[in-house]
Image (spheres, helix red, strand yellow):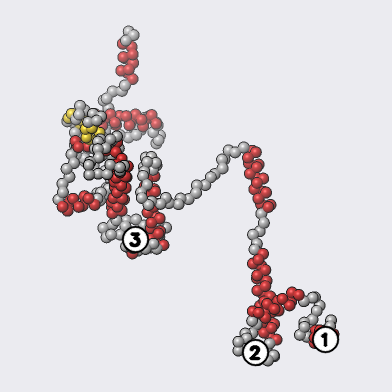
Amino acid sequence: MELTQPISLSASAHKSIEVLKMTDPVIDLGNLLIIDKDPVNGQNEEKSGVPSSEQLLNMARDNTQYLFNKVWELPRKHVDAAICAQLPECTYRLPREKPIPRPREPTKWERFAQSKGIASKKKHGDRKVYEEATGEWKPRYGYRRGNDDTKDWLIEIPDNKDPYKDYFEERKQNKKERINKNEVHRLRNIASAMKKPDGVPNFTPMKASVNKTVDLQLYKMKPDRDTPSRKKIRNEMNLKLHHAKNATASVGKFQRSLKGEVRPKLGKKRQFASNESGLDAERQHQLELLTHLQSAKPKLAQSKFNAAAEHLASGEDGRDMEGKAKGSKRRSANEKPGSKAKVHRQQHYNKIKKPGQKSVKSKAGKARIRKGA
């Protein structure tokens, strides 16, 4: 009794695989699609328009069970110790969420190999190579590749080579050059894939309007000319390269820098204060703000005001002297009316003249000079 009781409970917990439908649903096994035509409230006595969550779950379970019952009626085959059902042709053409992707643009080497008729010799079994030193199969290329010459602890130097040269460092430099060369080729392939058939790049430069056309002369400049437009394009390429490096899983931590690569100037991140600061910190912040407002002085350049006042005064004095000179004798050809030197002398005289004192050129002034006043 102790063994049969849990077995009966587990058997009663699972529902039957037989599903009863009032109307036969539409089945498309090619798309694994089922269209249930039964009314939602067919088995419910209540005539409410909204079904309950339990009723929806039961309908979803029954429809899924009905669909898989039809799937297991199809012919089967074994694939790697797994039983697979052979689906028939689709009867419904379901729309795609996104457009069909375009075929990948061939690389420069692929175009060259196609034009010369060079066939690829790669095989599925050539991805790994056997390393005799460790007795393991390792990748032929890439990380932890087999037969890596940069990991050798001993290098045999031929007789015709320099024995004092550091061949370990030479291998490292050659590896860096290969990596940089591959990176340049990769970026060139990306740039060629982004171009349209007519040769125009398939992207709009940053800060460019949509209505403006791209000037093709910017892409045909010589490398020795560093114009503002070319500098702008170079800065944009550096920024795109920076974004491409940070798009990796390691956020660009293990990406090597190219030769002559310039890090773009990024904007500063704003430092926001915490929303849950204490009462003392908030009081201190408000006091600092009030202190700054009270101690702030208007940024007025006093020198500019003095220069403007002198300019106005010099203009008035020049006009006065020009009016006085109308009744005087004719000026010489080289002398200009209201010249700068005379204006400066008049300003100097006005500064040293005492209040209430008449001009020297007046009759009272001349009489005072004769008397020795």
Quadrant in the picture for residue 63:
top left
Which of the two labelled residues, at mark 1 and mark 3, occupies the earlier sequence position?
A: 3
- What whole-number distance in Å separates the C-alpha atoms at marks 2 and 1? 28 Å
Q: In front here: 130 or 320?
A: 130
Which of the two labelled residues, at mark 2 and mark 1, occupies the earlier sequence position?
A: 2
Left or right of 308 on screen, residue 138: left
Q: Nearer the viewer, mark 1 or mark 3?
A: 1
Left or right of 96 on screen, residue 356: right
Which of the two labelled residues, at mark 3 and mark 2, occupies the earlier sequence position?
A: 3
Residue at 39% from the left image edge and 36% from the top image edge? 49
Please give the count of numbered marks on the rendered protein.
Answer: 3
- For residue 331, the mark is 2
Under mark 1, the amino acid is Arg
Q: Are marks 3 and 2 in contact (CB under 8 Å)?
A: no
Reply above or below: 344 against 127. Answer: below
Residue at 21% from the left image edge and 32% from the top image edge? 130
Label 2 SS: loop
Residue at 22% from the left image edge and 31% from the top image edge? 132
Q: In front here: 308 or 137?
A: 137
Under mark 2, the amino acid is Arg
- For residue 223, the mark is 3
Could you tell me which quadrant the N terminus lies in? top left
Under mark 3, the amino acid is Pro
Q: Is residue 6 visible?
A: yes
Label 2: few (<14), some or many (≥20) within 10 Å? few
Label 3: few (<14), some or many (≥20) within 10 Å? few
* Residue designated by label 1: 370
- What whole-number distance in Å separates the C-alpha atoms at marks 1 and 3? 83 Å
Reply above or below: 372 against 1. Answer: below
